[in-house]
């Protein structure tokens, strides 16, 4: 997809963070956008702010409610005509070791970060298949490339997002739908937002520095994934070392390297949004 001009885009979790930054980018390039978010106040504020950049629709949506997702998918297609790009950005995170949070928190983590992607993707994929055109972008995480203490369930969902995205890509190819693309995005810790305060130890933070803001990830979504068709952009790009080194090193060496990089302590200073 060479350009997002005149493309119709749905962004979940679009009122804040990566979703907001991505909506702003694609609107400024001539796309028509629908944002969904659970936070009604942030949704109204964002719609008002971004309406200066182009046509934007906004609807309150709990992406774990499949009836609401399917209802709003029909609304998006009515308001915009069709949906060319789906950006599954809505996310939920709670830190803590496995016994630090009740079951309900871990269930919500799975429901928002993984199960909801099944609903949203099913809602729009049929239309993309019919037109043999479209792009689904799923926000995964750098934690999909390694285990992170204090984020076990979150990490499990992000490993799942990567596998889900790749599997759908192969399904599309198998079905001859070469015009339907799939990408996963893998951000490391961002200075602001959901992961504010989290940071790798020394020397890890020198090799994989903090992402300075949400627009860095928005740029990866628009420029690398959508326009260039990259399968799994990682930011910073040194996150790619995780997969490279995991393949090259004996597993025990890789585990020791992650300890040396300060991964086990990275959530100790986490504050979040």
Image (cartoon, rainbow, N blue to C red):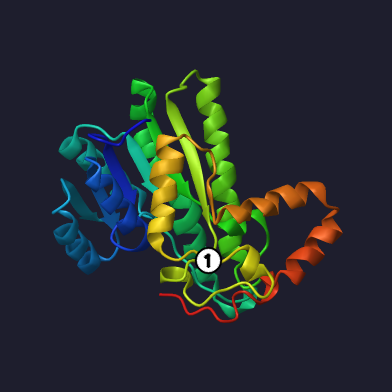
Left or right position of 183 against 67: right
Residue 112 appears in view: yes
Q: Assess disc 1: are there few (<14), some (14-19) or many (≥20) residues with their C-alpha within 10 Å of its C-alpha.
A: many
- Occupied quadrant, residue 41: bottom left
Hey, which quadrant is residue 201 in on the image? bottom right
Frontmost residue, 93 versus 223? 223
Name the residue that disc number 1 marks. 189
Q: As drawn, which residue projects farthest toward the front?
A: 206
Q: Residue at x 51, y 59 (%)?
A: 110
Can you give x and y, in whole percent of width and height, for residue 217 in the image?
Answer: 43, 55
- Residue 186 is situated, as x and y percent measured from the top left of the image, at 53, 53
SS at mark 1 in the image? loop
Q: Say which residue appears at 44% left-offset and 58% top-offset.
A: 112
State whether residue 36 is above or below residue 77: below
Rendered location of residue 178, percent (x, y) = 47, 22
Residue depicted at 32% across the width and 57% down the height? 21
Residue shown at the point (56%, 81%) measured from the top left: 269
Camera-side residue: 106 or 130? 130
Q: Does 25 sit above or below residue 40?
A: above
Residue 222 located left or right of residue 82: right
193 relative to 80, above or below: below
Quarter holding the N terminus?
top left
Which quadrant is the C terminus positioned in? bottom left
**In the rendering, at what x and y percent does residue 272 appear?**
45, 75
Residue 67 can be seen, yes or no: no
């Amino acid at each position: 997809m060479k350009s997002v001009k005149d493309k119709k885009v749905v962004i979940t979790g679009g009122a804040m963070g990566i979703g907001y930054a991505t909506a702003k980018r694609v609107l400024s390039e001539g796309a028509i956008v629908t944002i969904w978010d659970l936070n009604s106040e942030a949704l109204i504020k964002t719609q008002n702010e971004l309406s200066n950049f182009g046509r934007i629709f906004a609807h309150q949506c709990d992406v774990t409610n499949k009836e609401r997702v399917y209802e709003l998918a029909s609304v998006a297609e009515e308001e915009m005509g069709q949906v060319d790009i789906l950006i599954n950005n809505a996310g939920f995170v709670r830190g803590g070791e496995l016994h630090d949070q009740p079951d309900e928190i871990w269930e919500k983590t799975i429901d928002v970060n993984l199960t909801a992607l099944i609903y949203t993707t099913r809602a729009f994929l049929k239309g993309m298949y019919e037109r043999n055109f479209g792009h689904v972008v799923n926000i995964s995480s750098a934690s999909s490339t390694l285990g992170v203490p204090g984020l076990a369930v979150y990490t499990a969902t992000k490993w799942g997002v990567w596998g889900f995205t790749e599997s759908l890509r192969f399904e599309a190819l198998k079905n001859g739908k070469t015009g339907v693309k799939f990408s996963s995005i893998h951000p490391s810790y961002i200075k602001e937002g959901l992961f504010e305060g989290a940071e790798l130890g020394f020397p890890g933070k020198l090799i994989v520095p903090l992402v300075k803001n949400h627009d860095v990830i928005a740029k990866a979504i628009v420029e690398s994934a959508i326009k260039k068709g990259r399968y799994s952009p990682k930011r910073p790009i040194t996150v790619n070392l995780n997969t490279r080194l995991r393949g090259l090193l004996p597993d025990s060496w890789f585990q020791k390297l992650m300890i040396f990089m300060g991964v086990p302590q990275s959530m100790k200073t986490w504050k979040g949004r």
